[in-house]
Amino acid sequence: MTKFTRRQSLVLMGAAATAPLLASPALAGNKIKVGALRFTSHSASFVAFERGYFADLGLDVEFKFFQAATPMAVAIASGDIDYAVTAISGGLISLAEKGAAKVIGGALSEHPDYNGQKILASTAAFGAGLTSPGHLDGKSFGMTQAGSSFHYMGSQIAKKEGADLHFKPLNKVGAIIGALKSGQIDAWSIVPHIASALDGAGKAHIIGNVADYIPNYQVTTVFTSAHNAANERAKTENFLKAFSMGATDFNDSLVRMTAGAQAADEMVNLVHKYVYADKPIEKAARSIRAGAMLINEGAALNATSVKDQLSWFKSEGLVKERVSYETVVDDSYVKTIM
């Protein structure tokens, strides 16, 4: 199995962004590093850690936090982290083609019955008439890098609206937020806890739902190195099992809300350790609740959505035509949704 240094991984991905956590040695045994973003949508891993599900299955987890999807893919390829949850990106697909990464499950999904990602307009653009996605023609749209999930979402929205969007790469989510607030970009799409906070503060305006344009979109996936997928089956199965238990708790508490008010409050407090941790719970709670999107039970993977995304990457010339679903995905670990 091909092993990449971090430098080689960055070269393969066009050095789109610099990943943190330089030169971490590969960890042996059941000590694992898990990549995450400080988003409510990554809560399954946080719950599994805080409630001891990882530990119960013999996994000693350390989190490493990132600000975009592409650097996480680099870190998986170089061995800086072992497992991660993030959107499918051109960088991830390219590394899978090189034998360095593999999608092994599904995480966040758009679902018609539950809250989902929002389409935002800047205050300046909204005031100038961008009050619905139907007015996106000729507007600028924020993304981290070309081939990111933001690029994919914007393209699908534009396609259905017959709009010509101008994509602006800004590398980090924080930079996109700043550009939206200042009117340097006109529009963006993002998970609801960020969208609702911006809208509620009058810093941007929600003008639509991503689910209306990409139904049943597999927003994020669980992925690991190709080596782990092929040769560390027991450890990988245990990771997915603990992750799935965390997802069920999260869904019951804040998405389906079947666990009761006390469970919901407890879940908000747990997530707050990782999301909006710099804000008092009184201010963070509303955004955390607003960001509760469905995480697939059992880490099930929507194979149809993944294939649709792969087709788009090919159509845009962002990945090679020869890359197949099987190149990117090892779906032997979880149930697939067609």
Image (spheres, helix red, strand yellow):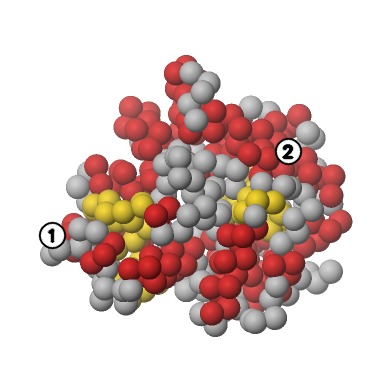
Structural crowding at the residue carrying mark 2, measured as other residues with C-alpha within 10 Å and reported as few (<14), some (14–19) or many (≥20):
many
Q: CA distance from mark 2 to mark 1?
A: 48 Å
Left or right, residue 12 beside residue 4: left
Counting from the top left corner in percent of width and height, residue 189 is at 37, 58
Give 76 or 195, whichever is nearer the viewer.
195
* Mark 1 crowdedness (10 Å alpha carbons): few <14, some 14-19, many ≥20: few
Numbered disc 1: secondary structure: helix
Q: Which residue is mark 1?
A: 127
Quarter of the image for residue 163 reads bottom left
Picture quadrant where residue 305 is located: bottom right
Image vertical order of residue 186 relative to residue 44, above or below: below
The residue depicted at 60 percent of the width and 43 percent of the height is 296
Residue 29, horizontal then vertical, whole percent? 83, 45
In the shown orientation, is residue 317 left or right of residue 55? left
Q: Residue at left 66%, top 44%?
A: 299
Q: Which mark is residue 264?
A: none
Q: Quadrant of residue 78?
A: bottom right
Quarter of the image with the N terminus in it:
bottom right
Residue 295 in sight from this viewpoint: yes
Residue 100, how many percent across, how many down? 73, 68
Amino acid on which disc 2 is placed: Lys
**Lower sequence index among marks 2 and 1:** 1
Q: Quadrant of the C terminus?
A: bottom right
| Residue that appears at 64% across and 70% down | 93
Q: Residue 15, relative to residue 180: is it above or below?
A: below
Residue 310 at x, y = what percent? 60, 70
The foreground one among 171 and 250 is 250
Residue at 45% from the left image edge and 40% from the top image edge = 113
Mark 2 and mark 1 in contact? Answer it, CB < 8 Å: no
**Residue of label 2:** 241
4 vs 246, nearest the viewer: 246
